[in-house]
Amino acid sequence: MPRTPAHTPAVNAVPAVEPTGTALERALGRLPRVVDLLAARAAEHDRDGTFPYQGIEAVHEAGLLTLTVGQRHAGPGAGLADTVRVLARLGRGDASVALLTAHTLLHHAEQARTAPWPAALYRRLLTESRRGPALVGTLRAAPGRPSAVTARRHGDAWHLTGRAAHCPGAEALAWLAVEARTDEPQPRTGLFLVRADSPGLEIDPAADQLGLRAAAGHDVLLTGARVGADAALLPRTAPAGPPLAAAWRQLALAAVLLGTARAALDWSAGRLRGSAAHRRPIGELDARLTGAEELVHGLAARTDADPTAAERAPAVQLLAARTAADTVQQALTLTGSAGLDRRHPLERHLRDTLSLRTQLPAEDAVLDSLGGALLGN
């Protein structure tokens, strides 16, 4: 079906009156109210598979969707530590909204560091961001697999053809960064910046996933979608020095996972309140989860101060992902059948953590890389 950009005004959105302080402080000050709003609607969107327009609007109105816009663009210029902090809190409210926010924040953060977007296109994105939520998504092939999208040169533009599966937020994105492989004699792989309302771009509303249902991870169909030559980021190469972009992504998504696990543990503790028999196992889960949170938040702060710390991100996100998954599963064991009752949020948190883990590098690949570095092979 053709994509038709949609926008639903917020109801009970964050008030326009702002507290004093910097833009970053104002945004962080609004965070608790936004999280409460997300949590109040998360079950409904999960059950119906409807997109959380109101939640995204609230995140935008609070200034959280543009938190990482660089200071040279008159943005708050949030670093990785503040980004992780925000995403962990949003994950407590609604993992789907937190994931969509993460993807957009990562694009703004990368622009602040290395400016991969052409200046004119990024100015357009910023203008759209002032008018309302301007979500940005990235469509990449699974690790080790070639891109399913082909880019063919036609004069001063590229035409993209192919199908990109499971694009979070597909129905509400403003821009997509699509990984595609050129059909040149020596093919190159890069990212192509595509307006979501471009001719030749359609959404196949086939998503019916186990978790992150509100994220609407539909397939994107490209049939000759035109991209100007200036919007082709070719070739895509790893940044020089520490793997900052990868660290930002891994720690940001790990934060969403940990926030979801924290919400699961909080609900379980409330359900079991007053039970002396559950004090030690709940305390054990809290200790492990707190340790994982400290790892992610601590490494994020270290990376802001010393970019070489980014090299530790793969190991830290792996430990955080394992801890988050184990926390939710153990919480289910402790609460029994009530935890699987769809009237309660715990089973949703379980499904969301399972889906979120697919957004991170595969464990085998991370462990193989870490082991290879130690063994010198």
Image (tube, rainbow, N blue to C red):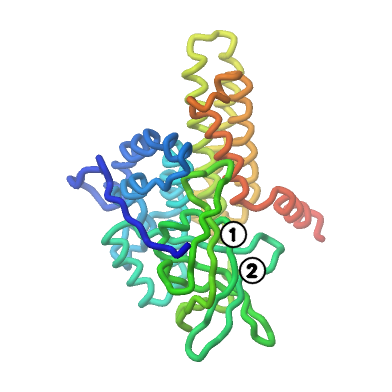
Q: Which mark is residue 315?
A: none
Q: Quadrant of residue 76?
A: bottom left
Mark 2, secondary structure of its residue: loop
Q: Position of residue 277 (x, y in %)?
A: 59, 9
Q: Mark 1 or mark 2, which is nearer the start of the sequence?
A: 2
Vertical order, 269 against 305 (above or below):
above
Residue drawn at the location 48% of the way across and 79% of the way down: 226
The residue lying toward the viewer, choosing from 233 and 77, is 233
Describe residue 70's horizontal placement relative to residue 17 as left or right: right
Q: Looking at the picture, does residue 141 appear above or below residue 325?
A: below
Identified by mark 1, the residue type is Ala
Query: Viewed as shown, does residue 101 lie left or right of 208?
Result: left
Q: Is residue 169 above or below residue 345?
A: below
Q: Secondary structure at mark 1?
A: strand
On the image, numbered disc 2 is attached to which residue?
148
The residue singled out by tag 1 in the image is: 165
Instruction: Report if residue 248 is visible in the image.
Output: no
Q: Position of residue 178 (x, y in %)?
A: 53, 68
Q: Nearer the viewer, residue 148 or 64?
A: 148
Residue type (three-letter) at the residue carrying disc 2: Ala
In front here: 289 or 174?
Answer: 174
Instruction: Confirm or deny contact between disc 2 and disc 1 (CB under 8 A).
Output: yes
Instruction: For label 1, count other residues whose C-alpha is less than 10 Å away and answer few (under 14), some (14-19) or many (20+).
Output: some
Report the residue at 55% width, 59% height from top.
219
